[in-house]
Amino acid sequence: MSNEAEDSHTVPSPAPDASSTPTSSPGLDEADRAAALRAGRTPVSPKFILGAIAAFAVLGLGGALLQHFDGNLGLPTSTTLAPSSTTTLAPEPLQESPLDEFMGLKDIGFQNAPGIALTSQNGHPWNLRDDRGKVVVLAFYNAICNDICPVLGSEIAQARALLGTHATKVDFVIVNTDPHDLRVSRTPRALSVPGLAGAKDVRFVTGPLAKINPVWIHYGISIETGKKTPVVTHNNIVYFIDPRGRLRVQVDPFASENRSGAVGLSASDIHRFALGISRVAGSLVK
């Protein structure tokens, strides 16, 4: 069994995947983005894909931080995912099912989740350790809800309802992924758009770049933004942390984008993914 140590380990790097893979590189290259978009598993604008490399300098925040974002931020110009720690107990794999495949479900072991200390939408400090004793569903999307937020937020809203009697034992935490808007807001669009505003078990956490960038890095979230444009892109991962603070499962949320740039997914697929979230979270409840 793994040690109940300080939350300092780094998530093991999963196998390469265009839509959700943690990476130490600045981000997905143009070919990978195009392939991922054709597969409908990443909310990246086609216009951005075609023009990003030629139009502006790219800043990779979750993995490599350059000095051209609002000047020199005084942060490292490059970072590398640390090797994962060895665990003494192999994970017991969940039974494979079509729903697992649909969600891109992966068992990731029993190592302690990397620490998170940010600020919630209510302006209160929030630390991952404060949620010991509960299952934490950890997601990532933008404060202004212009990425996968409408889809993943709706899935979270439905999953909460589907948890039934387990609902009081599961918390949902969404980490801001927008380096252009790291302010604390009591009514962020990230919660209001998908109907999560006011939910006591849902937190949208943010903080200054110096504090939030290590969270992106430790959890394999690669973020790209331009020097002269507010366009932000990132990969999509949802983690499930058990009541002992250990990473257990990850899934790969996805969405499609139409010609006008609106991100969406069919109602049936949203419900199916929400059902999967509720089942995985419920299976970890003690």
Image (cartoon, rainbow, N blue to C red):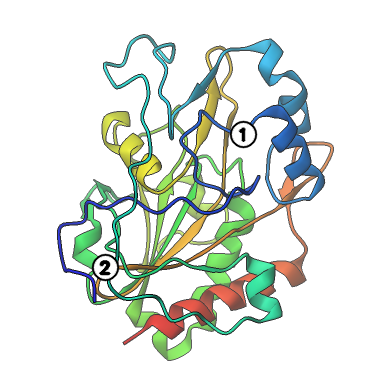
Residue plotted at (58% across, 50% down): 149
Residue 122 position within the rendered picture, expressed as x and y whole percent measured from the top left: 29, 51
Q: CA distance from mark 2 to mark 1?
A: 30 Å
Describe the element under mark 2 as helix, strand or loop: loop
Callout 2, which amino acid?
A: Gly
Q: Nearer the viewer, residue 262 or 218?
A: 218
Sequence-first disc among 2 and 1? 1
Callout 1, which amino acid?
A: Leu
The quadrant of the image that shows the C terminus is bottom left
Image height of 50 relative to 268, above or below = above
Residue 233 position within the rendered picture, expressed as x and y whole percent measured from the top left: 59, 34
**Residue most extreme to the left:** 5
Residue 41 position within the rendered picture, expressed as x and y whole percent measured from the top left: 71, 51
Q: Nearer the viewer, residue 105 or 158?
A: 105
The quadrant of the image that shows the N terminus is bottom left
Residue 84 position within the rendered picture, expressed as x and y whole percent measured from the top left: 34, 53
Residue at the spot of label 2: 245
Image height of 92 relative to 131, above or below = below
Residue plotted at (69% across, 69% down): 102
The part of the image, by quadrant, that contains residue 2 is bottom left
Residue at the spot of label 1: 28
* Left or right: 135, with 267 as reference point: left
The part of the image, by quadrant, that contains residue 129 is bottom left
Residue plotted at (26% across, 50% down): 116
